[in-house]
Amino acid sequence: MDAVSSLEMSLLRRFNIGDMPKRTAAKYPDRIALVFEGHEITYKELNENCCRMAHVFEGLGAERGDRISFLTHNCLQYVYSWLGACKIGCVANPLNFMLKPSEISYIVNHAEARFFFVEDILIPQVLEAAPDLKSIEKFGIIHINVPDTEVPEGWLSLNELFDACTDTSEPLVETDDDDMCSLMYTSGTEALPKGVMNTHVNWLNTAASLVADFSLSKDIVMLLSIPLYHVGGKTLLLGSIFLGARLVLEYAPNPMEILELTQNEKVTFWVYPPTLYQVLPSMPGFDSYDLSSLTKCESFGAVMPVALLQQWQEILPGTVWYNYYGQTESTPLGSTLMPEDFERKIDSIGRPHTGVEMKIFDEDDNEVPTGEVGEIVMRSPSVMKGYYRDDAKTAETLRGGWLHTGDLGRFDEEGFLYFVDRKKDMIKSGGENVASKEVEDVIFDHEKVMQVAVIGLPHEYWMEAVTAVVVPYPGIDVTEDEIIAYCKERMAGYKVPKMVLVSSDVPTTPTGKILKRVLREQLLKSGIKASG
């Protein structure tokens, strides 16, 4: 009898993200998998459409390991594209739709992508970058909201290719569990973004965590507003498919639409950063929406302020809350504060997820005693394969067999983890270390403050001056003197902001995370100097 071939062994034993819709469709073919702008897609249709897209890419010459770049808001085409690409061993390289041409050029060139598919309304910013994209063999347009958009000369139409393909058979391509299947670029606090190589087995652990750590089931109805280029968006997508749940996909985060979709689709699970939970109650007619279907709410990206939690507990009595910590490099497992501990440990980011080991290290990578602050490090099957084409940064970040997160934290006696600050967001002021998050927490408790970002600005005497940028609630006025006086009553003098700037907004990602690096650059470019 002939030996089992490597392809047969791969198909027999592998875990591939592209296989997830196939296996869920075998169990629940007629269940609704996705809802998008009035369209309902069953699990059977989802898998067939992913297969069709896989054959589209094969027809273009895509092969195992090829990177395919995408610049698009959330849409069905991207869902089919990512999972279809995975079926044939390709890698999706999704880009933030807010990127400028020069930023697009850097990422696509660094990723060495062969194909680039772009949403209709985003064509102009890519056309400007196109002459510099040397590795791209074929460009394509994704028609979503402007179907009459003219296809640029020499470009393909992904919609037409997909509509013309009727082959719904499963592609027979050998892949490995540890093959890269997504290449997401994350900037963090550094100038040039780094390409995070997440693998099929990384994503399997993440999907399984939603069952083990959040008690989710096929009966959940998720609302996915987080962009699918973001690790959080991908987590909800795969978790929903893994469970056989119903996922309501939103084109982009829109507070009014979130309320409408939650009411109309009976959404049971929200996942948003605190900034969005702050904004939602101020929407016109908020009290008229029926949000009673919500049973679980998760916060990520920052610790939920006590006052905000209390506000939402009055709005949604009985709904359970989670606070999530993770990063792209950990796909994005880390830790979660569970509902039973949420109120008494609200300033904590909880305990490690299932299968995740976390410690606190000092500058020499020695574990520190309980209660002391150091860098959060972790081990898990969800940890990235490394940074694409950056062996030095990979070695630095994964040294000693631990993922060094770049975040400072501490454990308490009960094993609960507390986020202190990003290492690079610690402000060195007058010889003292000031955690920007600690100052933000105090200012956020002020009744007039909707958003706050604390950064360090260069100063002749202090080296770095603690500077707060405050966004008040709509129609509310707040002054620098008010905030400084408020802080002086609640914290040591060296932590009190030397300057407070009142603004109408602060730069954020589409998921609501404040971009401190961008904010700092904007202030320095405008010529603002720290006083005090």
Image (cartoon, rainbow, N blue to C red):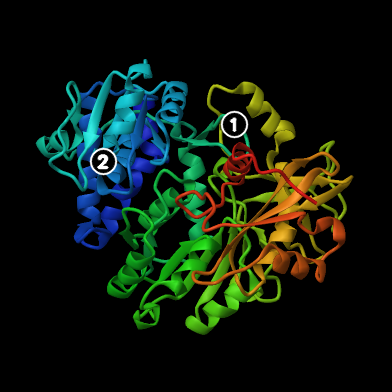
Q: Residue flagged by tag 1: what amino acid is it?
A: Ala
Between 92 and 315, the one lying in front of the other is 315
Q: Quadrant of residue 54?
A: top left
Residue 443: x %, y % from top left? 69, 65
Q: CA distance from mark 1 to mark 2?
A: 27 Å
Q: Which mark is residue 191?
A: 1
Q: Residue flagged by tag 2: what amino acid is it?
A: Ile
Q: Is residue 59 left or right of residue 94?
A: left
Q: Quadrant of residue 282?
A: bottom left
Q: Is residue 279 left or right of residue 71?
A: right
For image coordinates 61% across by 41% down, the residue present is 517
Q: Which mark is residue 483?
A: none
Q: Circle 2 — which element?
A: helix
Please name the residue that numbered disc 2 is placed on.
121
Between 488 and 180, the one lying in front of the other is 488
Q: Is residue 141 left or right of residue 99?
A: left
Q: Circle 1 — which element?
A: loop
Quarter of the image with the N terminus in it: top left
